Image (cartoon, rainbow, N blue to C red):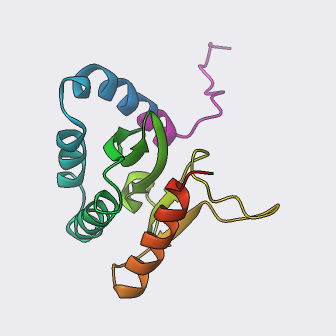
């Protein structure tokens, strides 16, 4: 029987691509400012995703002068110091039917034993902007 290479990786193709993209960011993007990194990633998105990403970017960056931005695993991400607080994941990145706005461990959103860390987003409107603003303000509040 001929040797057959069996894929035993626990990662999907999309996840492996995200890891390769993160390595590329570490090499190539480190020379760019965070704003330049995010602008490049947003420019690569589909028109509908780009519209949402630009709106989120403007909204989040306007919440606090302490928030900075750069890419994180190929996604626009928003930081306090060196800690990722939140990010925008285009649906096309992982062939999902929707994009998401998500939060990382550094976000101060803890609420008992169970709380959401990611939200599907299909469009920006006043209600969505209000919710994002409230969540990011809470996420970035000092304890």
Image coordinates of residue 109 in percent, x first then y, are 63, 59
Image coordinates of residue 54 in percent, x first then y, are 23, 63
Is residue 6 on the magenta stretch?
A: yes
By secondary structure, the bulk of the magenta-drawn segment is best described as loop
Choose top left, top right, bottom left or bottom right for residue 108.
bottom right
**The N terminus lies in quadrant:** top right
In the drawing, does residue 64 fall left or right of residue 45?
A: right
Q: Residue at x 44, y 33 (%)?
A: 82
In the displayed orientation, state which residue is furthest to the right.
113
Q: Which residues are magenta?
A: 1-18
Is residue 4 on the magenta stretch?
A: yes
Q: Residue at x 34, y 84 (%)?
A: 125
Image coordinates of residue 94 in percent, x first then y, are 45, 53
Residue nearer the viewer, 4 or 1: 4
Residue nearer the viewer, 128 or 97: 128
Count the marks: 0
In the drawing, does residue 38 fall left or right of residue 114?
A: left
Q: Residue at x 41, y 44 (%)?
A: 79
Image coordinates of residue 132 in percent, x first then y, are 44, 71
Residue nearer the viewer, 43 or 81: 81
């Amino acid at each position: 029987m001929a040797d057959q290479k069996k894929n035993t990786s626990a990662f999907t193709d999309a996840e492996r691509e995200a890891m390769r993209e993160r390595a590329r960011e570490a090499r190539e993007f480190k020379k760019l400012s965070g704003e330049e990194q995010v602008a490049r990633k947003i420019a690569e998105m589909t028109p509908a995703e780009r519209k949402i990403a630009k709106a989120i970017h403007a909204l989040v960056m306007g919440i606090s002068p302490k928030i900075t931005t750069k890419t994180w695993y190929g996604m626009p991400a928003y930081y306090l110091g060196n800690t990722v607080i939140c990010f925008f994941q285009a649906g096309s990145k992982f062939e999902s039917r929707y994009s998401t706005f998500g939060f990382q461990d550094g976000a101060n959103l803890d609420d008992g034993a169970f709380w959401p860390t990611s939200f599907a987003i299909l469009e920006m409107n006043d209600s969505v902007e209000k919710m994002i603003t409230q969540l990011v303000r809470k996420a970035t509040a000092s304890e």
